[in-house]
Image (tube, rainbow, N blue to C red):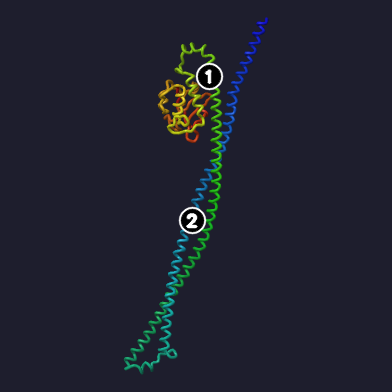
Amino acid sequence: MMGDGRSFLMTRDFSAKMVAVAMSALLTITIPLTFASQQKVAYADTTSDLATVQAQADAANAKLLDIASDLTIANDDLYDIQSQQADVAAQIVDTQQQVDEAQAQYDAAMDTLKKQAVQNYTSDQVDYVAVLLDSSSFSDFATRIYLVEKMMSQQTTAIDNVTAAKEELDTKQADLQSQKDNLDTLETSAQEKSTSIQTTLDEQTSYVSGLSSEVTTLMAQQAAEQAAASAAAATAAAAKISTTSTSSSSSSSSSSSSSSSSGSSSGSYSGSVGEQAAQAALRKVGCSYVSGGEGPDSFDCSGLVTWAYAQAGVKNLVHQSTGQYNACSYRFSSSSELQVGDLVFYAKKGSSSISHVAIYVGNGQVVEALDENHGVVCEATDGNGMTIVSYGRL
């Protein structure tokens, strides 16, 4: 009876301890997963906000370009008007000089005519007696009378011509002044339009700058949230791998013979190697991306795979995504076959050529050296925006 009681108590205690260990392991996995889920939600919200603000910024930028184009047109119009103003002003100056010259000619002709009139006319008649007495003959007298009248006629014609020219210049000057007045009005209007558009442009520039600052802030927030989500996902994945490894090791002795004899249609696979590589890669989440980098603090995508598998004892793995694809002993196309440590191969959108590789860490997630902006991250297998081409197992 006592033996049975002790056996019952020991069994109950052992069961309680196992439940506690299991609960502890479950919490170890669940807490990081919950945190990672919260981080993903926050990251998604920030991404949504960023997309909204970025769309506003793009629209504002487009409007800014339209306003800048309007300002260019307005300033071109203003420049044309000012050029016409300068041309008309130059013509006015030139015309004024011609008017002044015509006025001087007119004044000189009138002065000459007055002097001749004083000399040759008495009471508006030619002093024929004086001309006759000064003449040596009648023929000389007639010649003098003709010359006096001709000279008077020529002087009168000259005065008429100068008068007509001056009147024409006065008309031209008045027309030019009218053009200048119209251009002055147009310039004022064009200047006001240019100033108004410039004010609008300045306001739009300030608005765009504010949106750009908001975009920058949201991008920084997005990066921070993404990094936190990635770190939480990495912690959760590492915890799950550790728990799985512990569980696997406790039953390895009983299952090793059957597994070695039965084989697998998926090809040979050393779980410990894949898990070790995945764990090693997860420890590098947050490291920077450098083209050609293969650790220990900076990586590119295939460099991370090369380094991680080297930590698991797989040496001399080629540092190139296509080469790593070719090195896989088993390649498959269904995600249902994925095991921790498998490689996921990607192509850019619209292409089928492998250009990126990541390490599967379980729970639908991979660890990868993504790009210069993100570095090494842990995220969903389809979270990098590229197309999955194939899966592989080394």
- Quadrant of residue 113 in the image? bottom left
Side of 129 where 181 appears, left or right: right
Q: Are marks 1 and 2 in contact (CB under 8 Å)?
A: no
Q: Residue at x 60, y 26 (%)?
A: 31
Residue under circle 1?
Answer: 245
Q: Residue furthest front?
A: 296
Is label 1 in a helix, a strand or a loop?
helix
The residue lying toward the viewer, choosing from 247 and 100, is: 247
Which amino acid does the dot numbered 1 rest on? Ser
Residue under circle 2?
Answer: 75
Which amino acid does the dot numbered 2 rest on? Asn
Picture quarter with the N terminus: top right
Label 2: few (<14), some or many (≥20) within 10 Å? some
Reply above or below: 89 against 68.
below
Q: Residue at x 51, y 50 (%)?
A: 67
Q: CA distance from mark 1 to mark 2?
A: 74 Å
Side of 69 where 144 appears, left or right: left
Q: Residue at x 63, y 11 (%)?
A: 11
Side of 23 where 172 appears, left or right: left
Percent position (x, y) of residue 292?
42, 32
Percent position (x, y) of residue 345?
45, 27
